[in-house]
Image (tube, helix red, strand yellow):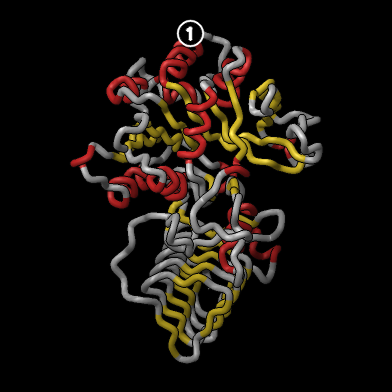
Amino acid sequence: MGGGPRVLGIVLAGGEGKRLMPLTADRAKPAVPFGGAYRLIDFVLSNLANAGYRRLAVLTQYKSHSLDRHIATAWRQSSMFGDFVAPVPAQQRLGPRWYTGSADAIFQSLNLIQDDHPDYVVVFGADHVYRMDPSQMVQQHIDSGAAVTVAGIRQARSEAHQFGVIEAGGTDGTKIMRFLEKPKDPPAVPGSPDEAYVSMGNYVFTTKDLIEVLHADAADDSSMHDMGGNIIPSLTADGTASVYDFADNVVPGATDRDRGYWRDVGTIEAYHEAHMDLVSVLPVFNLYNDKWPILTAQVPLPPAKFVEGGTAHETIVGAGSIVAGAHVRGSVLSHDVHVGEGAYIEGSILMPGVRIGRGAVVRRAILDKNVVVPAGAKIGIDDEHDRTRFSVSDTGIVTIGKGVVVQP
């Protein structure tokens, strides 16, 4: 980092992701594959690493094996400059218990902060799809002298009641006056009556203030020990919290279309929609921005292959995949996916190792790793029949869990 302020990154990656079942049946939400080549955690780690923050602790908890393995293989850092991306499981330093909340996760991991001696601590969530340059938020935080800065994204006021909402004020409109969890009547952004600031779950703390507030929170038996629910309101009450407007963030290489994109993929519907955002001719989220790349481990597979008249339209196709005499539309095929002759895939997400038999039809479906669809099978055609076999969302998206061999 040279002569600048010393910044430690902490990524909160303990998410269980119940609303993403069955994709989270045996993996933590941040480890869920996304976009054909990535896992959800790659987005936050890429944002931090591209900004030059490469000393990162990832706090894990729930079903973390695949997440730990991904970090160990994809995110190895050179030890020469002291860089690291380290998964940190619940260490039970304060007795035999798991993390009781996101603030408790950091409190139980205070040794990381004390060992590193950072000036500032960046605490980001692990399961959103977006690009951001966190260094711009850190700079605003330093200039403001606040104890904490919370990233806020502008949402329509009519929608904001589903989220944690920031009421901003003060002379420059960046001081947090109140932090409200799912308010019925969300307060507006200063100067913009139809918008509200929704918390993105991304925070920058001045280290000494973070340590103080964590100790006070840990001693409070009535606290839920949650960052959004307890820590931020506590600092707001002290008058030392400020908001960073995500709309001010400038990411190199962003297009007009994908600037300011941020998606919480916490439900099957949102997860499916976010994939559909990737595949249009002018994508709503552009994976091909080489000035701010999304980084991950690349698998050693040959290029994708289309044979026997196989075609794909508005579709991402990963390495090692083979489309043989089949037609694919508006879909995301990860690496090592095989689609057999005469099959038809539309509006679907196929994860690594999926096998689609001859003449099969798959519409508006999410197939987890190594799912096998036999010849002639139909998924996403008969809603009632699908509900007897698979998980089907309210809008009819079929999700089939890892390794399932569909019965013909």
Instruction: Check the picture and name the quadrant holding the N terminus.
Output: top left
Q: Residue furthest left?
A: 80
Mark 1: secondary structure: loop
Q: Position of residue 279 (x, y in %)?
A: 57, 68
Q: Residue at x 42, y 24 (%)?
A: 106
The residue sitting at 46% across, 65% down in the picture is: 371
User: As rendered, which of 112 and 252 lies closer to the eye?
Assistant: 252
170 relative to 45 in the view: left or right: right
Whether residue 243 is visible to the viewer of this picture, yes or no, is yes
Report the front residue among 313 and 358.
313
Q: Using residue 97 as the reference point, say whether residue 264 is left or right of it.
A: right
Q: Going 31% across and 52% down the picture, which residue do you hit?
A: 74
**Residue 54, above or below 394:** above
Q: Residues within 10 Å of mark 1 (few under 14, many from 20)?
A: few
Name the residue that disc number 1 marks.
Answer: 219
Q: List the single residue furthest toward the bottom.
A: 308
Question: What residue is shown at x 48% (from left), y 23% (from top)?
Answer: 103
Relative image position of residue 80 (x, y in whole percent):
18, 41
Any part of residue 376 in sight: no
Q: Position of residue 274 (x, y in %)?
A: 59, 57
Residue 233 image position (x, y, % from top left): 61, 19
37 in relation to 26, above or below: below
| Res 200 quadrant in image | top right
The three-letter amino acid code for the residue at tag 1 is Ala
Report the front residue among 216 and 52.
Answer: 52
